[in-house]
Each structure stands twice: as C-alpha cells, then as structure tokens.
Image (cartoon, rainbow, N blue to C red):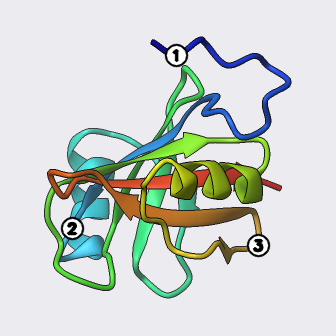
Amino acid sequence: MTTAATTTDKAAIRGLDLAAYLVADPARAIAFYRDVLGLEPTAVDDEGRGAEFTLADGSTFGVWHPDGEAKGGTVMFAVADIGAAIARIRANGGTLSDPQESPVCFMAFGSDPEGNGFIIHQRK
C-alpha cells in the first residue's frame, strides 16, 4: 500500500488540468461545442489542431487532433515539476515522451495499458 503524496512532493499528480476528446476534424468539433452546446473557446490552436473551453467551475475541456489516429479521450494531469514526475513515472515502469514545451506549459505524453492517453502537464 502506498501513502498519499504531500503537497511538497513536486512529482506528485496534483489535479486534472484538462479532459479532452481526440477528434479527426477539429473545426467541426469546435463548431459543435460552440454552436450546439454554447461553449465559447478560450484558446484556439494557431495551426488548427484544436481548442480548449474553460468552464465556469475553472475546469478545462478540449478537442484536439493528435498526430496519429484520433480515437478516445485523454486526461492532462497537473504536476509542479515535470522533470521529477517523468523520472518517477519512468522509474515505476511507465513510458512517457520527453517533455515538449509550448508557450504556456510543458507536456509529456503517455498511455495506460489499455491504450488510453494521458499527459503529464506543468503550467509555466
């Protein structure tokens, strides 16, 4: 049995930063969530790969076109130190990409044994 991580453990998962659907047609998905469900995009990718919608409770939902096949969903787990989190997950037997930097964050991509995607995410 493991013990709960403390708030000083910078490698610990602290929360959920994003829940997303992986889509084949980002423009169509954005239009659906905007025009049908009434969600206003709060961030739209400059390259047309997707968008994010920040909801009233502060949570974020996104639609994204991945580099590979679009299927299923993904979650983005928040961490304080992406390097420490990647090292811990790899030491525990997980496989993650090297971190990628965007203007607002660092991300490392992985999947669970069932093929569900997850992202380890550190905001700047």
Image: 67 above or below 4: below
* Residue under label 2: 23
Q: Alpha carbon of mark 3 to alpha carbon of mark 1: how far?
A: 35 Å
Quadrant of residue 87 within the rendered picture: bottom right
Specify which label sits upstream in the sequence, 3 or 1.
1
Crowd around label 2: few <14 · some 14–19 · many ≥20 (10 Å): many
Measuring 49% from the left and 47% from the top, which residue is drawn there? 92
Q: Residue 99, labelled with which disc?
A: none
The answer to whether residue 41 of the structure is visible from this angle is: no
Q: Amino acid at mark 2?
A: Val
- Judged from the image, the secondary structure of the residue bearing numbered disc 1 is loop
Give left or right: position of 26 versus 123.
left
Specify which label sits upstream in the sequence, 3 or 2.
2
Q: Position of residue 42 (x, y in %)?
A: 57, 52
Measuring 61% from the left and 64% from the top, which residue is drawn there? 107
Q: Nearer the viewer, residue 95 or 26?
A: 95
Q: Alpha carbon of mark 3 to alpha carbon of mark 2: how far?
A: 23 Å
* Residue under label 1: 2
Q: Position of residue 28 (x, y in %)?
A: 20, 69
* Residue under label 3: 103
The answer to whether residue 98 of the structure is visible from this angle is: yes
Q: Amino acid at mark 3?
A: Pro
